[in-house]
Structures are given as C-alpha cells and as structure tokens.
Amino acid sequence: MTTSSPIRIVAYAPRWREDFATLNLEWLERWFTVEPIDREVLGDPETHILAGGGHVLFAIDAEDRAVGTVALKRESDGVYELTKMVVAVDLRGAGVGRLLMQGAIDAFQACGGKELFLESSKQLGPALALYESVGFRHYPAPRPGSHYARADVYMVWEPGAG
C-alpha cells in the first residue's frame, strides 16, 4: 500500500502534542503493555524529550492530520535513542514509517549526533526490516540501562550499512 496524498515531516508543535500520545498509546496497547516510562514521556514530551535536546517529528497528511510520529531522545553528548515511532493504523505499510525514519536520521545528523540506537521487539518484523534497510545493525539485547521490559532487540545505526 502507498499513500495517495503527500506526507510532510515536520518538527514538534504543541498542536500535535495529543497526537504524539494518542498514536503511541494505540500502538502500545495493541502490541504490548503501556509501561510507566511510556506514560511519563507521552504525557510530557516537552520535558522528557525536547528539554533535554531531543526532537519529536510528525508525519502530516494533506488534511493537516498527524498520521505518524518519531522521537530522538538525547541520552548523552552525541548519543540519541530513536523512540516512540508509530504510524496510524490505516497507513501502516504505506511508506510513512520510511519518511519518518529518514526525517529522524536527517535530524540526528543535523545536530551532530555520534550514535543513534533503538530498542524494539522481535514481534515487530516489518519495523525491524525497515530499521535494517536504513542501516541499523543488531547488537546483544537488552541494552545496558534499558527502560523497557518489552525490549528484546537492540540496534545501532551504522551509516552506509543500509
């Protein structure tokens, strides 16, 4: 499936704050359990992502609706976690995730990032295939200091490996 309307990737704006939570909660409730760390971050992305030097991006459709989102959470100097990536149910498989991924990688490179990692689950085959296709490589999981009980995949982006 491909999208019939143009999708643009934009930086966080307060008007899409509720969409950040709604899209992610729907996905988490469908596949896993919403963990306390999820509620903290989704309830206040300004404090938990943006204030620390991170980014939240949105995929916006032609009707000006947020149909996907992804975040880069700054862990330390130059180290970012790719997190909270989700696409609306009706557009999964339509290329929106790839647009979000490219936007996240562009933002990571623009801020001079040195390491980009993510945590995921073996249950999410299409997502893992996307990550691998853009250059994420598998490392032993869980990641030291992981916040997520559901994470059994740990990947690091290696430019040129995709």
Image (spheres, grey):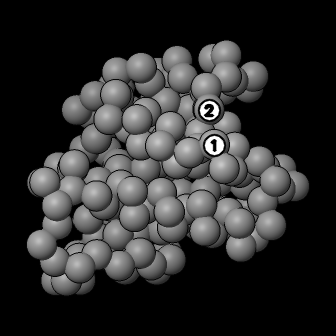
Q: Which amino acid does label 1 sit on?
A: Ala
Residue position marked by numbered label 2 in the rendering: 137
Q: Which residue occupies 59% across, 39% down?
A: 136
Residue position marked by numbered label 1 in the rendering: 161
Q: In which quarter of the image is the N terminus?
A: bottom left
Report if the CB atoms under discs 2 and 1 are less than 8 Å apart: yes
Mark 2 vs mark 1: which is more N-terminal? 2
Question: Which percent across, then down, holds residue 160?
Answer: 66, 50
Q: Determine whether the residue tagged by mark 1 lies in a helix, strand or loop.
A: loop
Q: Using the image as rendered, state which of residue 37 and residue 83 is in the foreground.
A: 83
Q: Using the image as rendered, state which of residue 67 and residue 46 is in the foreground.
A: 67
Q: Quadrant of the C terminus?
A: top right
Determine whether, in the image, residue 131 is placed left or right of residue 106: left
Q: Which residue occupies 52% across, 48% down?
A: 134
**Image vertical order of residue 70 relative to residue 50, above or below:** above
**Image vertical order of residue 35 relative to residue 6, above or below:** above
Residue 147 in view (yes/no): no
Determine whether, in the image, residue 122 is placed left or right of residue 152: left
| Residue neighbourhood size for the residue with mark 2, other residues' Cα within 10 Å, grouped as few (<14), some (14–19), many (≥20) | some
| Residue neighbourhood size for the residue with mark 1, other residues' Cα within 10 Å, grouped as few (<14), some (14–19), many (≥20) | few
**Image vertical order of residue 4 relative to residue 20, above or below:** below
Q: Determine whether the residue tagged by mark 2 lies in a helix, strand or loop.
A: strand
Determine whether, in the image, residue 68 is placed left or right of residue 85: left
Question: Which percent across, then down, holds residue 158?
Answer: 69, 43
Residue 110 in view (yes/no): yes
